Amino acid sequence: MDPYILIDVAVFIGFVVAVVATGLLKSRHEKDSEGYFLAGRGLMWYLIGFSLIAANISTEQFVGQSSQGAAHVGLAIASYEWLASITLVFVAFFFLPAFLRVGLYTIPEFLEYRYSRAARSIMSLLMMVTLVCVNLPAVIYSGAKTGEVVFGAKTLLGMPIDLVTVSWILGILGGVYVTAGGLKACAWADLLQGSALIVGGAAILVLTLGKLADAPPEKLTVGTTTAAAQEPAAPTPDLARAGAWERFKALNSSKLHMVLPASDPFVPWTALVIGLWIPNLYYWGLNQYIMQRTLGSKSLAEGQKGVVLAAGLKLLIPFIVIFPGMMAFNLYKQEMKDDASNKTNKETLDSFDAQKASPEASRVAFGFDDEFAKLYPQKAAEIVAFNGRVLGAEADPGKPLSDANKELLRGLAAKNKLLPKDQRVEVQKDLIGYKYDSAFGLLLLKVVPTGLFGFVLAAILGAVISTLAAMLNAASTIFTMDIYKQYLHRSASQANLVAVGRASVVACMVLGCLMAPQVDHPRFKGIFTFIQEFQGFISPGILAVFVYGVFAKRAPRACGVVGLVLSPVLYGLLMLALPEVAFLNRMAISFAGVVVVLGMMRLMMPLPAPIVMPTQGNIDLTTSRGAVWAGVLVVAVTVALYVVFW
């Protein structure tokens, strides 16, 4: 084996072993349910802050957001991070005091005190299904896909390093220290992982800027927000003399802003008003695997300081993730084009070539994006003609090829709804012009040197393990405390609860690893869409019932069940009736619908007296003045960033 590869392997293994060992050593004394699930309610602010970041940041950010930076979305995708900073400050001073006062183990438990046991049970089931069937498989898949790309066709102990193998490696590593040590193991491991993520991301940013500064101007590509095929930037004297930062701004000036058209499927400007706040508030304030870190706070002050620390760190993420993604396209446009042509599109194009001789008998149609149409107009024209014959329709000759094909496929979607399953026409995975998802992998392979490569790869895959561990810990807590203890064994001993928690970690891990490879199927339309679409069913309703629960003291108890059940119904109807509407806008409409219904219930059936939530446990509920001022600073910096990059 190449000695340079051995250095990276040694660094990678050493870091992973250090993280797992730290988690296990720091948590070896946690024996009861409070110790196992909530770290004995003794977490300090620095553990909470870095653990929140490590639980949140995964390959979804490093791969997904860097690819959006490389594509037309650009810096607009940073709203997921910067608005999260404001959201976290809100959570620290409004949600967290209410939750710690009640002494919760799980977020759904709050609904029993405020509304009813039925509301708690419904939310617990919704969160268990989402964690085990959506979040776990998606996170394992994203990490496994990265490992598969980086390691290629290599083998490990005679086994191919493919999607399935890497899925099981990640799942087992994440499950080991959660099963043994619970939340405290996660928190201490996350302290190392979160720090490594920031350091590794910053190193990639610096190295990529250096690469951009040294590249010949004629080899660079301008990034634009249009769907047109990109051409290399002209070697102007200004670009030749410019430093790294000046080159970056000159090449990406059209993408260094936060506003995209209302029709954009990813971050329409309308989402900044309402839509993006819904998943943010749900994720950071009501999501068990995130909030579990704060529920284990030593005091309210420690929890608030930790949450505000995480809010400050979130401001850095676009600079170490999205900016390198933009530069990846500037430097490696041709590689992204080749990846799309030779890998992503190959199977679909082979299928098209096999079927184009007899379109009338085909049960398959083909989609492509705008860039594919610009780069390969002849092939795009063939596909449009083929799809027209499959569907028995004519494409509009006056429209661009991409628009004409999209119109045909919209007609197909409407037609398929009226046909039996065996007669429907299936749309193959869209053909693409550029493989933007390869942006981060290209930076790892072409920019990061030996030694540091092993560290960065360990940090990134370790981030997957941290996020996975957080989800396993949350799923086991909800199952044990909200389902097992409530319905199966109400008098369970502390030892029994910990044993059930550990067994459920293993069970959830196995299910997640089995389901992860299925996320690769084209019907899920990519990991980002897979996660957001499924969470869109539940997050508007959960957010609405919690907002009413915290702030509308006389809202009737029935609001809990009504809001939780109504939300997936509304979102599902919107998906069927308005599939072209961006999912963030569908979330906003669903949220508005639930709020209106709950508001009517509040007006028509107000409680005779406001509900007073119980105060349980002996946690210090004094607000941290330092956290208040730090929170104000975070909000001010976030607003300033929007002013600068608007």
Image (spheres, rainbow, N blue to C red):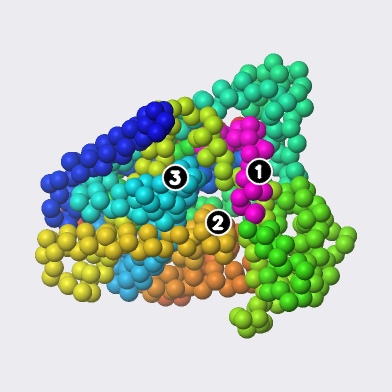
What amino acid type should be assigned to the residue bearing mark 1?
Asp
Tell me which label, 2 or 3, sits earlier in the chain: 3
Report the residue marked by disc 1.
338
In the visual, does 264 lie left or right of 594? right
Q: Nearer the viewer, residue 589 or 418?
A: 418
The 10 Å Cα crowd at callout 2, few under 14, some 14 to 19, many 20 or more, is: some
Q: Secondary structure at mark 1?
A: helix
In the visual, does 205 lie left or right of 192? right
Q: Secondary structure at mark 3?
A: loop
Q: Nearer the viewer, residue 584 or 465?
A: 465
What is the number of the mark on residue 526?
A: 2
**Residue occupying the point 25% across, 51% down:** 176
Q: Secondary structure at mark 2?
A: loop
Q: Residue 563: x, y in percent?
A: 44, 70
Q: Main secondary structure of the magenta part?
A: helix
Q: CA distance from mark 2 to mark 3?
A: 25 Å
Quadrant assignment, res 389? bottom right
The reply to whether callout 2 and callout 1 are in contact (CB within 8 Å) is no
Report the residue marked by disc 3.
154
Where, quadrant-wise, is the N terminus in this rendering?
top left
